[in-house]
Image: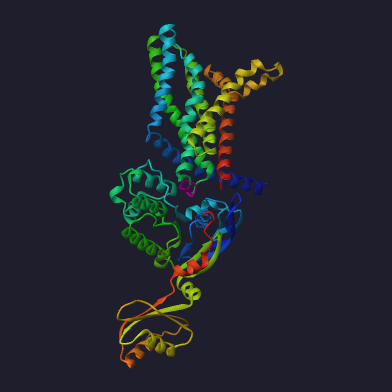
Amino acid sequence: MDRIKILAEKAADRAGEIYRARLREAVIIMKKEFRSYFYTPIAYIVTTIFLVFTGFFFFKDFFYYNQSEMRNFFQLLPLMFTFVIPAVTMKLFSEEMHSGSIEILMTLPVTVLDVAVGKLLAATAFVGVMISPSLFYLATMIIAGSPDPGPVIGGYIGALFLGGAYASVGILASSFSRNQIISFITGWAACFFLWLIDKVVVFLPAGLGFVQYFGTDYHFQNIARGILDSRDIIYFLTIIAVSMLATSRVIEERR
Amino acid sequence: MINVNGISKSFGDVVAVNNVSFIVKDGEITGLLGPNGAGKTTTLRMLTCYLRPDRGGIVYDGLGTESDSIAVRKRIGYLPESAPIYADMIVLDYLAFLAEIRGCGAERIRQTAALCGLNEVMHRNISELSKGYKQRVGLAHAMIHDPDVLILDEPTSGLDPNQIIEIRNLIREIGKKKTVILSTHILSEVEATCDRVIIISSGSIVADDRTENLQRARGGEKRISVTVGGTDFGGLSESLKKIGEDMDIRESGEGELVSALVTYRGDRDLRPDIFNMAVRKGWVLYELKQEQVSLEEVFRQLTIGGENGQD
């Protein structure tokens, strides 16, 4: 038994070692990718488009209907993300393949999964930066009224999970083609499909009601109500894990 | 030691590399020579773990490129063809990224930048650099972690003659301590830098030997150019035939002087005999030069007709 225990401890240590080493590589890749967003104007353009659209819908309710809440902002967010996030992720592998720099990257001492996870962390961090100016709406609401903190906090947490899930799908789409436009369209179609799933339940027979659980919006709206349910978090983490492993597989297959 | 054992790689129906095997000893500069599309780049990509061989395997001192890929990549410095480096980064940021991922300190960035002559462009955007400087950044990329094995794909392509000489000197310098494998289709590059040459044609090895052995064994022929005054070609030819057998004597050059190109096989050096003959006959010797059959001719003999493969 002792021998088994020692072996188990050794295996756990080794697993921890590998995990720490690999996470280190992913963080280095993340830092590089995150910086690279700001070398080109695309990040600023995407952020501006995002803020103009969400700002318009937020202030429409704020001024027209005197509503001091962010519910409409968070209702619109998943649909906006289906368009904006593939634009953020489309370059992540496509550009590497187009320019040939993937050869540089894949001959460094990093695994494909390190690279994919690093890129995902960078894209999710960028989504965080992109939605952060919307805190200005929150500040406006706090000054003008007294918003319920639960849905607001839940909304932002949900936005990061949703952003991460869509970014992972966008990265998978980006690994399919060296053409960024194709990657964008594929990524948008996949994210839009995930957003749409729970909307089509009304057209399905009653027995197929469970289909809504596959929809991103269903789980996002749960979190945005201010309820942090492990089922919703597991759903988003599953999408991320499956997309990352699939990305790793797609890139590996090219070898 | 690098042991390449029967590697093959196909892209669809095109066989890029077919059953290639060779061993590279530590501290050797090996040139992979072949026409465009011969399979040099594909071979190097398999050596650097970028591509997976369909068959066969590559082992670096007991570490396999598939089973111990990360450990192998740590030992290798690789300059891909035309150095496809992140164009939107500045040189310093790029080297800092590499140093971090390779686990080197800031001191190593300074040393590598100095070694590759990058000090004056450290804060320039890579996209703004000339081809020569981009190539240097590629070399810095390959050397920043002081690797045991350096793999360079067309290291001097796009460089001006001064830069070519600089890079060749650098490769020779590195080759004193490290194992270097470089690919090229420029024959003079192999002659100038490599201890050993592997010639690839249509995805297969057609020759593998030390550079000088290859010239000697394959060519086996020597050529002497003689120019004299005081006789005609007939007289010169008759006298030359008495010196050795199995010689091919052709008239070369025009004008008052008589020139002949003597081609023969064997290890014997005929120049002293030709000189003594000229003295005996009272001819004035203007030129007496021996040439070895160049690697270019060896290359042409071996690779002719094999230029339709995958690079």
Establish if B168 lies above or below B294.
above
Establish if B273 lies above or below A166.
below
Can residue B176 be seen in this snapshot?
no
Q: Picture coordinates of residue B104 (x, y %)?
A: 40, 50
Q: Nearer the viewer, residue A5 or B202?
A: B202
| A107 inside magenta stretch | yes
Name the side, left or right, on which A115 lies relative to B15: left
Q: Nearer the viewer, residue A142 or B49?
A: B49
Residue at x 37% of width, y 42% of height = B89
Name the side, left or right, on which B1 lies relative to A134: right
Establish if A248 lies above or below B236.
above
- What is the residue that sits farthest to the top in this orientation? A65
Q: Picture coordinates of residue B193 (x, y %)?
A: 40, 65
Name the side, left or right, on which B108 lies relative to A23: left
Tell how many labels: 0
Q: Picture coordinates of residue B276 (x, y %)?
A: 35, 90
Establish if A92 lies above or below B222.
above
- What is the residue that sits farthest to the right in this orientation? A207
| A71 inside magenta stretch | no
- What is the residue that sits farthest to the left in this orientation? B120
Main SS class of the magenta portion in the image: helix
Can residue B82 be seen in this snapshot?
yes
Residue at x 42% of width, y 50% of height = B83
Dividing the picture into quadrants, the one containing residue B123 is top left
Q: How is the image coloured?
A: rainbow
Which portion, as a residue range, is magenta?
A103-108
Q: Picture coordinates of residue A106 (x, y %)?
A: 50, 47
- What is the residue that sits farthest to the bottom in this orientation? B280
